[in-house]
């Protein structure tokens, strides 16, 4: 019985998201939002992508009323992050997120400052300027 309980606990813990992940949230006002769950690694590690435009939704996790998408390529430097999202068949680009990052340790007031923003382009749907918060 103890082995069964231990196995159940182990499988439950394995199903939970990794602790070393954090959401980056980007929005273009009330029109569009994209959320990206990123792993804390030396290289960019995209775990989940969720997009909303008006009343339409896309997600790598799927769900009712949500169009399934797949993570495409991703690239990050200290001042840029590029993430592409494809359809389920990895046939078409569904979204291109381009984020530019700036960080200053301590300007005159001694407080660090962080700025992130860029564009979200969804071919055939639209393109928006977005501001981002997160890792």
Image (spheres, rainbow, N blue to C red):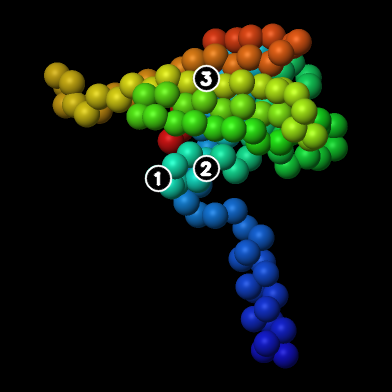
Q: Tell me: residue 110, above or below residue 53.
A: below
x then y, percent, for residue 79: 37, 24
Q: Residue furthest front?
A: 91
Q: CA distance from mark 2 to mark 1?
A: 9 Å
Q: Which numbered disc, 2 or 3, marks the residue that appears first in the sequence? A: 2
Callouts 1 and 3 close, C-beta under 8 Å: no
Q: Which numbered disc, 1 or 3, marks the residue that appears first in the sequence? A: 1
Q: Secondary structure at mark 3?
A: strand
> Quick one: quadrant of the N terminus?
bottom right
- Residue 125 lies left or right of residue 104; in this view the side is right
Q: Secondary structure at mark 1?
A: loop
The residue lying at 59 percent from left, 53 percent from top is 17
x then y, percent, for residue 134: 46, 32
Q: Which residue is mark 1?
A: 42
Residue 116 visible somewhere in the drawing: no
Residue 135 visible somewhere in the drawing: yes
Residue 14: numbered disc = none
Residue 45: numbered disc = 2
The residue lying at 78 percent from left, 39 percent from top is 62
Which is more toward the observer, 83 or 10? 83
The residue lying at 64 percent from left, 81 percent from top is 6
Q: Secondary structure at mark 2?
A: loop
Q: Which residue is mark 3?
A: 98
**What is the quadrant of residue 10 in the picture?**
bottom right
């Amino acid at each position: 019985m103890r082995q069964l309980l231990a196995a159940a606990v182990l499988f439950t813990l394995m199903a939970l998201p990794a602790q070393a992940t954090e959401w980056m949230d980007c929005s273009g006002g009330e029109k569009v939002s994209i959320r990206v769950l990123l792993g804390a690694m030396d290289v960019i590690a995209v775990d989940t992508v969720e997009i909303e435009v008006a009343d339409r939704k896309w997600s790598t996790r799927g769900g009712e009323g949500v169009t399934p998408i797949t993570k495409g390529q991703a690239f990050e430097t200290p001042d840029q992050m590029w993430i592409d999202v494809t359809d389920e068949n990895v046939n078409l680009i569904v979204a291109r997120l381009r984020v530019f990052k700036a960080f200053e340790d301590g300007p005159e007031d001694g407080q660090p400052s962080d700025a992130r923003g860029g564009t979200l382009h969804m071919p055939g749907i639209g393109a928006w300027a977005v501001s981002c918060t997160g890792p």
